[in-house]
Image (cartoon, coloured by chain):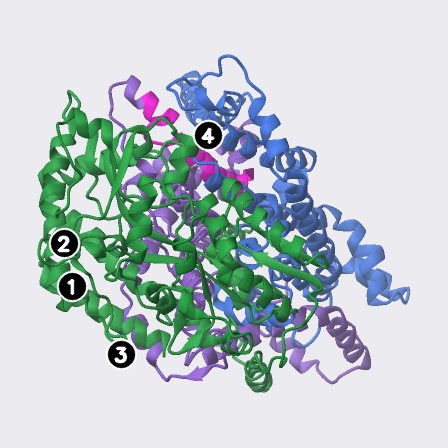
Chain colours: A green, B blue, C purple
Amino acid sequence: MPARSTRAVRSTASRTTAPVRATARRRLAAALALTAATATLIAGCTSGGGGAIDKTAPAHLKGTVSLWHFFTDREAKVVQTAIDGFEKANPDVTVTIHAGQDDEKLQKAISSGQSIDVGLSYTTAIVGSFCSSGAFRDLGPYVKRDKVDLGDIPQAERDYTEYKGTRCTLPVLADVSALMYNKAQFAAAGIAAPPKTLDELKADALKLTTYNADGSIKTLGFNPLIDFYENSPEHWSPMIDGQWLAKDGSSLIGQSEGWKKLLTWQKDFVDEIGYDKLRAFTSGLGQEFSADNAFQTGQVAMQIDGEYRSAFIADQAPDLDYGTAPTPVLDGIGHYGASYVAGNVAGIAKGSKNPELAWALLKYLATDTDTQVALANGLKNTPTLTSALTSPKLEVDENYRTFVDAAANEHTLTSPATTDGAAYLKTFQDAWNDYQEHGGDLTKILKKVDADIDAANQLAGP
Amino acid sequence: MTVSVGMTRRRPSRLLTWIAEHTLLVTIGVLTIAPIVFVISTSLMSSRQALTATLVPNPVDFSSYIRVFTELPLGQWFGNAALYAVLATVFMLVSSVPAAYALAQIRFRGANLIFTAIIVAMLLPPQVTAVPVYVMWSQLHLTGTLWPLILPNLLGDAFSIFLLRQFFLTIPKEYGDAARLDSTGEWGVLTRVVVPMARPGIASAAIFLFFHSWNDYYGPLLYTSENPAAWPVSYGLATFRGQHGTDWSMTMAMTVVIMIPVVVIFFFAQKAFVEGIALTGVKG
Amino acid sequence: MSTATLAAGATATATPSASRRQRTSPDARRRRVALVMLAPALLGLAIFFVYPLIASIFYSFTRYNQLQDPEFVGLLNYRYLFTQDPQIAAAVTNTLWFVVILVPVRIVFALLVAGLLARARAASGFWRTLFYLPALVPPVASVVAFVFLFNPGTGPVNQILRAVGIPGPLWFNDPNWSKPSLVILGVWVMGDMMIIFLAALLEVPRDLYEAASLDGASGIQQVRHITLPTISPVIGFSVVTGVIAALQYFTEAAVASGVASGKATVGGGTGSGLGYPGTSLLTYTQLLYTRGFTSFQFGYASAMAVVLFVITAVLLVLTMRRISIFRAEES
């Protein structure tokens, strides 16, 4: 775009200018007044949507319903298989799938009112804004009418799928994080068991780190950079039972001793190896979701990752000898065995042309035990129904067991929804990124994080 | 190539000057062309070789081109880009040629105010008006398509009007006056006198808009990012790179493919093009 | 604001036509025809320029996400913009960096190359086409190509540097080098500007040089006293349009961030790779885009738009009268 106005042109000698003409100004004023009136008019007519629903669910489903989701390639095929089951059960229904939808794009399509029926997003961040703005319809009336038992959905998942009492989404599988470790490297370094505390994690990590002749890192025991792959404040929150926001939405991060201790621990760890060395090493690693993932190539011996990694390893690095364990915790603060859970949420878009069909599809994806088991077996995400988590049909091996148990752990955490989405997480992450590189007065930095989050919440509104 | 003859300035070192100048020309020329050479040579490597420290394809491998055409919806991307660029250009001509003519060849009260408004509209960053315009298109349910980028051209394109006006100004008003004496109306003067005389100018305005639309990234990002079926090739390239990680060979093949139509058009219309850039400002 | 700009621009409205106003009916008829010819463009100006400008000002005082009615929040958006937004400092600094560095560097290079072409009598044909060629490359393609060329590990640039014993920087992956890398790209694609300068240089009357030469003026003196003054309006034009373009610097930075970060969400252009590396390529318009079309904070995005408009408008008011090509008076 910018290049555009730079094209052309050459000019001639300057000339004198005539005075401003009153008529021109008057005419302009009239034009402005007219357009201002139009502005108010147009701005005023955007409300609507929602409304009452039918008293009973339709007896026979017929028509076309669209599903937008973000999965690609192998994962998209798993979803397709599940959808095939829905179409088989409802022969007069066609599901149009828009796969590979980047979340940002999904949000844009829904926010601008395009005719999407069911949208499946991988971030719970949209729940706050979509429930309060009506971008996703209120599912309450449907749930009530069809007497859907929400008690089958674990508490944490129930929490992050509604906002201030409005349930506009249902969970469709979740991601739980845990520690993955390379057994061969552990054996070679003489480490018997995965670390349970942060002190052990650091000691093991340093033991597992090897260097090249020029001093650069060859392999890393554990990458402490907070912006590496799945490292993030959220995924690290179980280490210190981390809390985010108070009930009124104001930030608790700066007041928490746990976060402060965790950041201090991380910064010490980074400094012990050297930030520049870590950065140089990290920038040479493969992409997270490619076959070159550093854990899969053996360049990193331990990492915090989601349960889906197992499926990638089975697909891309089947020979890798690895184990899983709960996220290590800071002694006396975190609850060992607990994890951070967040997951896919699905809702019915405001612009849906056929909400009854959309609701039927959503119900099938979110509340049908067999569907959830089939999806979980294919995607290796954790089911979001207790009945599916305990189903004998769920294929649970030793490594996956860690995640299933963590999902059911009573101390497992999530991060609350806000109308500003996950902006507060990003604010925190940005501050942390800066701190791990430049250091500084941690109390002050975290206070600034609180202030920034509170100001952003005010901007985004209730 | 031009050989310097009859240099009027310094005589003692005419040859030395010539050598110095041309050494500089060649150096800059090499630096200018090198990126393109590297892009092409990488596109002819295998994906594996593109990740190694070699600069020359060995052996020459066309598989990246084959993969670009088989694995990507290139036809659709090119089709969308062509639809966008062609329709935008045609619509612009229909609306902007008469407007530019009126501003350049007809004397009437208010012309200058209108011209000034057009200049300001041309120079204003598009982001300034993005939100209300986006809201407008989304109320018309046209987001997710290229129409919000095409249709406005029916209502004139500020830059094109400006450019065309500069061309039309170079045509002496006397030609029009002569026709007017034969009781030809303004529309007649426009179609029978000015348009035939300003053909190169109109061509260059058309090419500018065509290229601008073909290359556009911001517009498709804003309006079509959520709908891959509507992506033009320029936007597709940016996305494609994200999905294909470190496959530089394929990325470079894609880069070459997207450049080809532009370069071909350029070589066919080089004269109109360069004149368009250089001479639009020559007014009476 | 728009009143000020338009009014300032309207200074050029010619007096002669006013005195002629009600003299003859052909005048009125001509005016009618002209307005008919201009009708689509006038409608376009109203719909895509005047109305959105006013609507932006209106939205900037509201909280608005398109799904609910705008809610009046007073100066909240502006207060956040000027005092609280943690990203705004980086966005403004980076944008100004491009204004202050990218614009002059491009102009100087374009002038030097144009001067060389004019001197070497190579103003048309092969050399001109060659130097213009990069400007033809679609911006997205040129950015992708440059990120590859300057790729720290396997890119040709660092390979060549390594071959001559220089350890190359991380270029697009290093916050300190990412902006300079884009300047190199900006210089590479300076063809448009070069052709404008070249045309201007060729218009400088030859006899001026000859006279100066006879008076014993050196080459440098000739450039200073003849060339630069003659083409200064063209340079002025380039500075103004260049600064305005730099204020809205978007595509190159967004694509470079996306491609260099290798994030899978690049297509969005402004997703998780926003400003990568670090916040070094986060520009004002990218932040505006993200706020508006990723977070759907239309009110806040509008406030950012209004501020951008004010800055551009002031710039235009200050410079438009000096750039004669923008003036409307009849010849």
* Pair 3/1: label in front: 3
Q: Which mark is residue A248?
A: 3
Residue C218, image quadrant: top left
Please check whether the numbered discs 2 and 3 fall on a single chain: yes
Q: Is residue A294 visible?
A: yes
The residue type indicated by label 3 comes to Asp
Q: Which residues are magenta?
A: C135-160
Q: Secondary structure at mark 1?
A: helix
Q: Which of A332 and C204 lies nearest the eye of the viewer?
A: A332
Q: Which of C102 and C170 lies nearest the eye of the viewer?
A: C170
Q: Main SS of the magenta segment?
A: helix
User: Residue under circle 4?
Assistant: B248
Residue A143 position (above or below residue B96): below
Instruction: Compute the Cα span from label 2 to label 3.
Output: 25 Å
Q: Residue furthest top?
A: B59
Location of the C terminus of chain A (image quadrant): bottom left
The residue type indicated by label 1 comes to Leu
Instruction: Identify the chain of the residue marked 1, using the numbered disc in the image.
Output: A
Instruction: Compute the Cα span from label 2 to label 4.
Output: 37 Å
User: Residue under circle 1?
Assistant: A446
Q: Residue at 39% across / 62% down in the picture?
A: A124
Q: Which of A337 and A205 lies nearest the eye of the viewer?
A: A337
The x and y percentages for residue B36 are: 50, 28
Sequence-wise, the earlier of marks 3 and 1 is: 3
Q: How busy is the neighbourhood of tag 2: few (under 14 within 10 Å), some, or many (20 plus)?
A: some
Q: Which mark is residue A263?
A: 2
Instruction: Identify the chain of the residue marked 2, using the numbered disc in the image.
Output: A
The residue type indicated by label 4 comes to Trp
Q: Disc 2, disc 1: CB below 8 Å?
A: yes
